[in-house]
Image: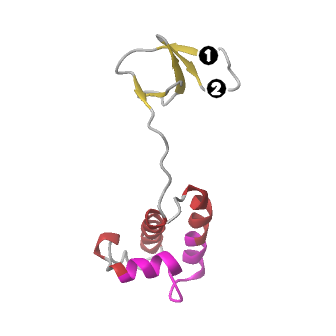
């Protein structure tokens, strides 16, 4: 099985074939680079997000939006109780949240929904 690598400097992605990397560029099927130890790092397999990780992402994004709206940051995720985290996971900004905050919450959920492990 071929292993995928990513260049530490350029971010290029490719498949190692011996002492060369075939770049992952559909528009340039013959794009190759020399494999140099330390310049390329093995790309780890993708691991899906858990629903709680997605909830944390929506919460942190909401904090940034709150600050930009002049509402204050609120508590950090780590400072929330388990009950508060579960409420956020299920309801987001809830009834107290304005429409923009709800759209942000729902938009992030929609964007990440296929990344969830089943819980």
Do we see residue 98 in this rendering?
yes
Q: Which mark is residue 31?
A: 1
Work out how far the residue at label 2 is from the one at label 1, CA to CA, in angstroms: 7 Å
Left or right: 29 in relation to 57: right
Q: Nearer the viewer, residue 110 or 65?
A: 110
Left or right: 22 in relation to 57: right
Residue lying at 47% horizontally and 66% vertically, measured from the top left: 61
Residue lying at 48% horizontally and 67% vertically, measured from the top left: 58
For mark 1, give the secondary structure.
loop
Name the image quarter holding residue 106: bottom right
Secondary structure mostly taken by the magenta-highlighted segment of the chain: helix
For mark 2, give the secondary structure.
loop
Residue lying at 50% horizontally and 88% vertically, measured from the top left: 96
Disc 1 residue crowd, few under 14, some 14–19, many 20+, Cα 10 Å = few
Name the image quarter holding residue 63: bottom left
Image height of 32 relative to 112, above or below: above
The percent coordinates of residue 43 (x first, y second) are 45, 33
Name the image quarter holding residue 53: bottom left
Q: Which mark is residue 79?
A: none
Left or right: 16 in relation to 28: left
Disc 2 + disc 1, Cβ < 8 Å: yes
Q: Which mark is residue 25?
A: 2
Residue span colored magenta: 83-105
Image height of 90 relative to 119, above or below: below
The percent coordinates of residue 74 (x first, y second) are 35, 78
Left or right: 19 in relation to 77: right
The percent coordinates of residue 85 (x first, y second) are 40, 77
- Residue 91 is one of the magenta-drawn residues: yes
């Amino acid at each position: 099985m071929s292993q995928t690598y990513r260049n530490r400097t350029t971010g290029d992605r490719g498949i190692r074939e011996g002492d060369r990397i075939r770049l992952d560029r559909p528009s340039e099927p013959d794009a190759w680079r020399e494999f140099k130890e330390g310049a390329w790092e093995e790309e780890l397999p993708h691991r899906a997000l858990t629903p709680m990780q997605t909830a944390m992402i929506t919460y942190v994004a909401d904090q940034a939006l709150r600050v930009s709206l002049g509402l204050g940051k609120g508590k950090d995720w780590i400072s929330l109780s388990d009950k508060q985290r579960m409420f956020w996971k299920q309801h987001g900004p809830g009834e107290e949240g304005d429409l923009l905050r709800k759209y942000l919450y729902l938009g992030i959920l929609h964007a990440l929904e296929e990344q969830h492990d089943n819980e």
